[in-house]
Image (cartoon, grey):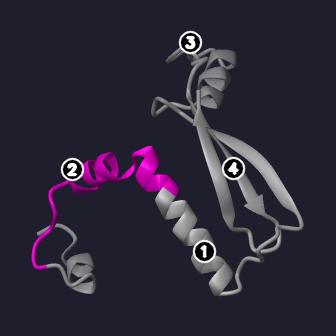
Amino acid sequence: MDSSDLQDILELREIPHYTTLQKAAHRLTNKKTLDMLMKKMLVLSIKAKILKKVVALGAIDSTGFESHYVSSYFVRRKAKGGEQYQTTTYSRFTKVGFVVDCASYLVLGGIPSW
């Protein structure tokens, strides 16, 4: 059996199907559910005194997610080295921008885009 040690630690009677997390993510990641989850998380953070009601200093940053298992850095590096495995780079990829409270490092919001 694969991952029997992990199965024991997590006290699982059987290993879930490999698509379980994917299906749950599809069901749970609609905008209404995510907005409700974010609001509840912020309320709980204020109650637990992790976050103040007014954020004194926040930061905004974004990151991109590759749409392929080969990074654009790898593609550029290989093209320069003479061994061309792939010459395609991607101009559209998933990106998310975050707003973070600098005192607690708590994510206050995020906006996905291309």
Image quarter in which the N terminus is found? bottom left
* Residue 60 position in % (x across, y down): 79, 49
Q: Residues within 10 Å of mark 1 (few under 14, many from 20)?
A: some
For discs 3 and 4, the disc positioned in front in the rendered view: 4
Q: Earlier in the sequence, mark 1 or mark 3?
A: 1
Q: Residues within 10 Å of mark 3 (few under 14, many from 20)?
A: few
Q: Earlier in the sequence, mark 3 or mark 4?
A: 3
At x 48% / y 63%, what residue is drawn?
37
The secondary element bearing badge 2 is classed as loop
- Tell whether label 3 touches label 2 (CB within 8 Å): no
Amino acid type at circle 2 is Thr
Which residue does the numbered mark 3 point to in the structure image? 87
The span from disc 2 to disc 3 (Cα, nearest Å) is: 32 Å
**Quadrant location of residue 113?**
top right
The span from disc 1 to disc 4 (Cα, nearest Å) is: 18 Å
For discs 1 and 3, the disc positioned in front in the rendered view: 1
Label ID, residue 98 = 4
- Check if residue 24 falls in the magenta segment: yes
The span from disc 2 to disc 1 (Cα, nearest Å) is: 32 Å
Q: Earlier in the sequence, mark 1 or mark 4?
A: 1
Which residue does the numbered mark 1 point to in the structure image? 43
Amino acid type at circle 1 is Val
For discs 2 and 4, the disc positioned in front in the rendered view: 4
The span from disc 2 to disc 4 (Cα, nearest Å) is: 28 Å
Residue range (magenta): 13-35
Q: Is the stretch drawn in magenta largely helix, strand or loop? A: helix
Task: Say if 58 sits above or below 69 in the image.
Answer: below
Task: Mark yes or no: residue 66 visible.
Answer: yes
